[in-house]
Image: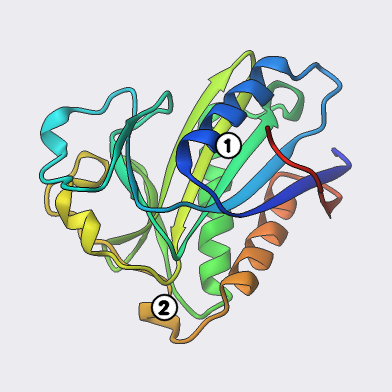
């Protein structure tokens, strides 16, 4: 079992600097580098994955669109959404990509259950759903046996920008968020519960909070 999983609490940061920092971390990490998870909120942005098609960007308007190197189609990030970037040595952990995705989905399902919300994954559409509406999105990139990008959980946000796209390439896909099902919640508490779930389901013994910047 791996030892300690380090978490960086980044607060609110623009998408592109965090993305480029993930790339650098992954490109430069050695085999002895510890795994990290970065927790962040982003200002409004649409991100278009490697398989992303322009027709799924219906009306982006004044929200920027960034083409990125993760899998998947187009999604939206904005304030009130908890994003977790998983910078893991997948080879060392012994996970295949499908297993990692399943473990991420399980983390989210159990987190939501802790708020009394019943959620499920779909075998043909990665992510987590509540009554058919998507509450969390997943997208990964594996390079040199290591993962980056990660998951985005809708906590308490403006969902309207999702209507400007076909979320994850699905026209008319309904989106939802935790606050619609659990009432008033503390964002920091959701983050803490996600940390605990990731430690548990990635088979780490414990967690720690890392200090210092990412650039």
**In the foreground, 148 or 113:** 148
**Where is residue 73 shown, x and y percent of the image?**
28, 34
- The residue closer to the viewer here, 211 or 202, is 211
Q: Nearer the viewer, mark 2 or mark 1?
A: 2
Residue name at image x 22 percent, y 63 percent: 160
Image x and y of residue 19, in percent: 52, 32
**Residue sitting at x 28%, y 64%:** 159
Q: Earlier in the sequence, mark 2 or mark 1?
A: 1
Q: How is the image coloured?
A: rainbow
Q: From the image, tell me which residue sits under label 2.
A: 179
Residue 142: image x %, image y %?
A: 55, 22
Q: Which mark is residue 100?
A: 1
Please say if 33 is above or below 129. above
The picture quadrant where one finds residue 179 is bottom left
Q: Is residue 20 above or below residue 133?
A: above
Locate residue 105, reporting x and y percent: 50, 50
The front one of 215 and 104 is: 215
| Viewport quadrant of the N terminus | top right
Q: Give the structural element (helix, strand or loop) at label 1.
A: helix
Give the structural element (helix, strand or loop) at label 2: helix
Q: Which mark is residue 183?
A: none
Disc tally is 2
- Quadrant that contains the C terminus: top right
Q: At 21% from the left edge and 39% from the top edge, which residue is drawn? A: 169
Query: In the picture shown, does residue 129 fall above or below 211?
Result: below
Q: Is residue 197 above or below residue 31?
A: below
**Spatial separation of the CA atoms under disc 2 and disc 1:** 27 Å
Mark 1 nearby-residue class (10 Å; few <14, some 14–19, many ≥20)? some
**Residue at x 54%, y 49% (from the top left corner):** 13
Q: Is residue 118 left or right of residue 159?
A: right
- For residue 110, side relative to residue 120 (left or right): right
In this picture, residue 184 sits left or right of residue 146: left
């Amino acid at each position: 079992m791996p030892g300690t999983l380090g978490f960086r609490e980044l607060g609110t940061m623009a998408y592109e600097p965090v993305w480029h920092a993930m790339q650098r971390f992954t490109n430069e990490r050695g085999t002895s580098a510890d795994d990290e998870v970065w927790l962040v909120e982003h200002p409004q942005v649409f991100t278009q994955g490697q398989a992303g098609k322009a027709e799924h960007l219906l009306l982006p308007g004044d929200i920027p669109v960034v083409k990125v190197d993760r899998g998947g189609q187009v999604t939206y990030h904005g304030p009130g959404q908890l994003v977790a970037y998983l910078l893991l040595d997948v080879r060392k952990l012994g996970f295949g990509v499908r297993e990692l995705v399943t473990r991420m989905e399980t983390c989210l399902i159990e987190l939501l259950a802790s708020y009394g919300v019943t959620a499920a994954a779909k075998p043909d559409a990665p992510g987590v759903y509540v009554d058919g509406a998507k509450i969390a999105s997943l997208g990964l990139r594996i390079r040199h046996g290591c993962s980056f990008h990660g998951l985005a959980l809708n906590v308490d946000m403006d969902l309207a920008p999702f209507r400007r796209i076909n979320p994850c390439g699905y026209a008319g896909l309904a989106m939802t968020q935790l606050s619609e099902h659990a009432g008033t919640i503390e964002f920091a508490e959701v983050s803490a519960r996600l940390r605990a779930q990731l430690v548990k389901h990635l088979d780490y013994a414990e967690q720690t909070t890392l200090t210092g910047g990412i650039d």
